[in-house]
Image: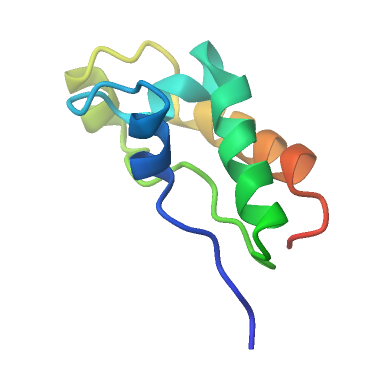
Amino acid sequence: MRLLDGAMATALQAAGLPAESLPEAWLLSRPEEVARVHAAHAEAGAEVVLTATFNLAAPRLRAAGVAATAGELAAAAVRLARSAAPSAT
């Protein structure tokens, strides 16, 4: 049995992400918060962490006013997850 991480968006909202904002916006503007959530999940026993990429569709990003491309955000999401939770896969 593998243990997965918890709700990324909920954790980021608890850290101050406005409810109407995309969590992916914080991948570049507040990466330390995203990394903190991954690290907390790993410390709690998660063996698998999921990247913060649920909303990575270009139309959705544009509609939310996120200037970065989906590719840039996906790469940042993977880097943050791997560095913050190296024991998880």
Q: Residue at x 25, y 23 (%)?
A: 21
| Residue in the foreground of this view, choosing between 17 and 63 | 17
Q: Quadrant of residue 38?
A: top right
Which image quadrant is residue 59 in? top left
Q: Is residue 70 above or below residue 67?
A: below
Asked which quadrant contains residue 84, the reply is top right
Instruction: Estimate the x, y position of residue 27 in percent, counting from the top left.
Output: 52, 25
Q: Is residue 45 left or right of residue 11?
A: right
Numbered marks: total = 0
At horizontal 54% and vertical 47% (from top left) the residue drawn is: 51
Q: Is residue 33 above or below residue 57?
A: above
Q: Residue at x 31, y 37 (%)?
A: 57
Q: Residue 43: percent from the left, percent from the top?
A: 71, 54
Q: Quadrant of the N terminus?
A: bottom right
Q: How is the image coloured?
A: rainbow
Q: Can you give x and y, in whole percent of width and height, for residue 80 in the image?
A: 67, 34
- Residue 79 percent coordinates (x, y): 71, 35
Q: Locate the C terminus and report the quarter of the image it occupies.
A: bottom right
User: Is 29 above or below relative to 69?
Assistant: above
Q: Is residue 40 above or below residue 26?
A: below
Kindly give the residue lying farthest to the bottom in the view shown: 1
Front residue of this view, candidates 13 and 49 = 13
Q: Residue drawn at (21%, 19%), measured in percent from left and top?
A: 64
